[in-house]
Image (spheres, rainbow, N blue to C red):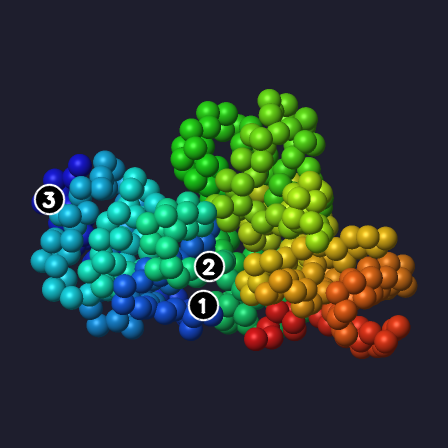
Amino acid sequence: MIAKETLKEIIILQRDSLEKLDTGILREKEKEVKILDSFALLITGIRRCGKSTFLHQILKKQKKWYYLNLEDPRLEGFELSDFNKTESIMKEVYGEEGIYFFDEIQNIEKWEKFVRYLIDKKEKIIITGSNASLLSRELGTKLTGRHLQLELFPFSYSEFLKIKKENPSIKSFEEYLDKGGFPEYLKKEDPSINNELLSDVVMKDVAVRFGIKNTSMLNKIAVYLISNVGKEFSYNSIKKMFEIKSVQSVIDYVSYFENAYLIFTVPRFSYSYRQQQVNPKKVYSIDNGFSHVNSTSFSKDKGKMLENAVFLGLRRKFKDIFYFQEKNECDFVIKQKNKIIMAVQSCFDFNEENKNREIKGLLEALNEFNLKEGVILTFNQDDEFLIEGKKIIVKPAWKWLLEK
């Protein structure tokens, strides 16, 4: 429990600090923000991807607002009952009417009860958090159909160009593949920033939250996953590798990392949901620069660096992403409204050595899903041709990433 005067002082200090915060470049997701009466807008994303700055950009467009960052160490001991004091203090500090903004609200147990109370009063609320599943599950229980979700990622290539004040080019794209899009890392280019981020996710978002004592093992699993981008993995192989007692524990750990946006898992496409769960999955990282700093092998494989960037470009737009494998393999097939709508190959250098393999995998997916055209994304090659009645578009990934 926090004393009322202490809470008031913190709210004032946070307000003053937020008003001084650089609003940075306008994020692409800003146009997707919808603030509705009796609804909570949930903004999720990994730590340090710019959620607070994004909130500030939204705040600047509002005439009246209330703000509270619940990850502030001065709020240690904040409880559900403190929300009642918070509401009255906010009105005292900010005025009678405003949109509620809560940063990292999932840190407070039973927070969803207070949000439900505000929604029942027809208030407008925006919430940020770094655990998508936790927030959605808790909101879904109390606020079925009364919340919207928006995901924020580290900077896209387009946003990277804005922050770096550079033009689209092979050189700038190569830099993006290497450095990624975490705002603070791009500003200072200090590797310890990405090292600390990994530590924070492992410790705060996983170990502390789920009561896991062996943090050294957790860290090793995280590094293993972000070092093996674009590769298949099985829960059983991780169990054996790290001598973990049960497969279920591995499933849980991977799920925790995924919900904290550290990694993404991509299932092999199957018409059977059960088969999807049994088949090996592939893993991708939240950010190239993050993997580069925290992995010894990632930056040595330019093909995997490109593939990770392509995956992130797709994931920003689509949630249901699979890889397709029968006789041959297609890196990505995209599902929308229960239908596969797109097939994409990622290939750093499309050449005579791999041309046959890449085309066969893409054609197999196009035929399976009755698609008329497929895309092969490369580092810097352009081409277009017909084969077996299917249109194959070869395009530089950096140009594709800039398409709306």
- Residue at 56%, 53% (x, y): give it: 287
- Residue at 16%, 39% (x, y): give it: 2
The quarter in which the C terminus is drawn is bottom right
Mark 1 to mark 2 CA distance (whole Å): 8 Å
- Residue at 48%, 45% (x, y): give it: 260
Tell me if I can see residue 183 in this picture.
no
Q: Amino acid at mark 2?
A: Glu
Q: Is the residue under label 2 in contact with that under label 1 (CB below 8 Å)?
A: yes
User: Disc 1 marks which residue?
Assistant: 29
Query: Residue 377 sits in which quadrant?
Result: bottom right
Residue 172, x across and y down, in percent = 61, 67
Q: Amino acid at mark 3?
A: Lys
Mark 2 falls on what kind of element? Answer: strand
Query: Residue 22 sits in which quadrant?
Result: bottom left
Mark 2 to mark 3 CA distance (whole Å): 34 Å
Mark 3 to mark 1 CA distance (whole Å): 36 Å
- Residue at 20%, 65% (x, y): give it: 98
